[in-house]
Amino acid sequence: MKTENSRLQLFQAFGIELEYMIVDKDTLDVMPIADQVLASLAGEITNDVTFGNVTWSNELALHVIELKCANPTADLLALATDFEEAVQQMNTILADFNAKLMPTAAHPWMNPETETVRWPHDNAEIYAKYDSIFNCKGHGWSNLQSMHINLPFANDAEFEKLHAAIRLLLPILPALAASSAILDGKDTGFWDKRLDFYRSNQKAVPMLTGQVIPEPVFSEAAYQAQIFDQIAEAIRPHDPEGVLEPIWLNSRGAIARFDRGAIEIRVLDIQECPSADLAIATFIIHAIKLLVTEQIAPLAAQQSASTEGLAKIFRQVIKHGEHSVIDDANYLQLLGIKSAEEMTATDVWKYLYKRIKKVYGNEIAPWKQQIELLLDEGSLSTRILNTLEANYEHANLKMVYSELCDCLEQNQMLTECLEEAF
């Protein structure tokens, strides 16, 4: 465990994790070969392999592979370039397997009941225990890819501010990042179906996820008592051998990692390319900065937001994405919006973008094109749905998701890729 003196301070550096699917180059069906790919790089079966600033590692499902910065970094612009190069290198390696990487938070036609293959090597006992309790073949387990943002804190005082700010923003994050509208070859009716599954896939032990929005706890001691200790008690009947640790079982939308002094945000669908993900990460980080520095609302007011109220907004946003109408006037006021009793999630983010540009103009400027495309043309779910034009025949799905694979390879957003294709 890191001591307080060795920990990073607020906003000093960040950890970013991106998950991708491995698919057949011709059919785009999932290919459960992550262990073979990592072994081809390392010369032996391994959970991860590092090249320079980037680490590739395994996930629960054998067709999913994770890309992350090897160490926390303050330079997300450079990291986007590192990720772009790493994706292209991985696609070169995957070509030997007749495979490639596919982006977005859900495979559009994978059948998890028949196509799921669990990681069978190190930590297999943990994965097997999860499977025995929750049946990890469902979409919410084996067909999901996300971006995680890790933000540091050095002590309880920093944790208090950071956790309060993140709780407040969590409900509207899917309005930026939703990319999982399509599952089982059809429109699910949700902009962020991944998170709909996320809410319920551990219903056998509901304490693990709670309401996804974390409880209003603002110190390590309170977090231990109100979250970790209660998770330990709830899981005990299902895991008498003690295989599963509460720190790993905590599945809220933002989880506190006191062992490494960080909060990990987990409600973000993966996008079509690293530049889109890093633009969203930068946007979110600076919105959190506005709250942490109390430029929008005082800390006590932020802490007063009820979990139930925040969870209600969150459920609306995973259903309707950026089109959600937020009619909680108190919530809007906590975000600095005092002139409206209701507002779409897009308009909330446009308001925050204006505030961020005034205060952090230089920091946000490199991401102007990506952020404004998101705000003007919508989330990736919206752009996928618009591109499909309500035609969910397999050939059309394959064409659009092939374009998304090209977006990933070229590190371009969906609209840009379509413009070049035509």
Image (tube, grey):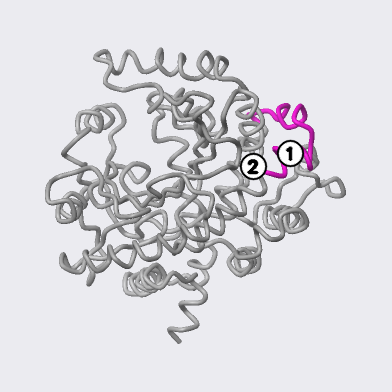
Secondary structure type for disc 2? helix
Amino acid, disc 2: Leu
331 left or right, relative to 141:
right
**Residue at 65 percent of width and 59 percent of height:** 364
Relative to 244, 11 lies left or right: right
Residue farthest left in this picture: 44
Membership of 297 in magenta stretch: yes
* Region rendered in magenta: 289-308
Would you call the spot at circle 2 few (<14 residues within 10 Å), some (14-19), or many (20 or more)?
A: some
What residue is rendered at 20% in x and 52% in y? 38
In the displayed structure, 224 sits above or below 68; it is: above
Front residue (pair 127, 90):
90
List x then y, in percent, for residue 401. Answer: 37, 68
Nearer-the-camera pick, 378 or 386: 378
Residue in view at x 56 percent, y 50 percent: 174
Secondary structure under tag 1 reads: loop
The vertical placement of 390 against 309, above or below, is below
Q: Tell me where residue 362 sits by quadrant.
A: bottom right
Q: Which residue is mark 1?
A: 293
The image quadrant of residue 338 is top right
Residue 257 to residue 331: above or below: above
Please tell me whether residue 215 belongs to the stretch shown in magenta.
Answer: no
Q: Residue furthest front?
A: 5
| Residue with the mark numbered 2 | 169
Q: Amino acid at mark 1?
A: Thr
Q: Position of residue 187 (x, y in %)?
A: 45, 60
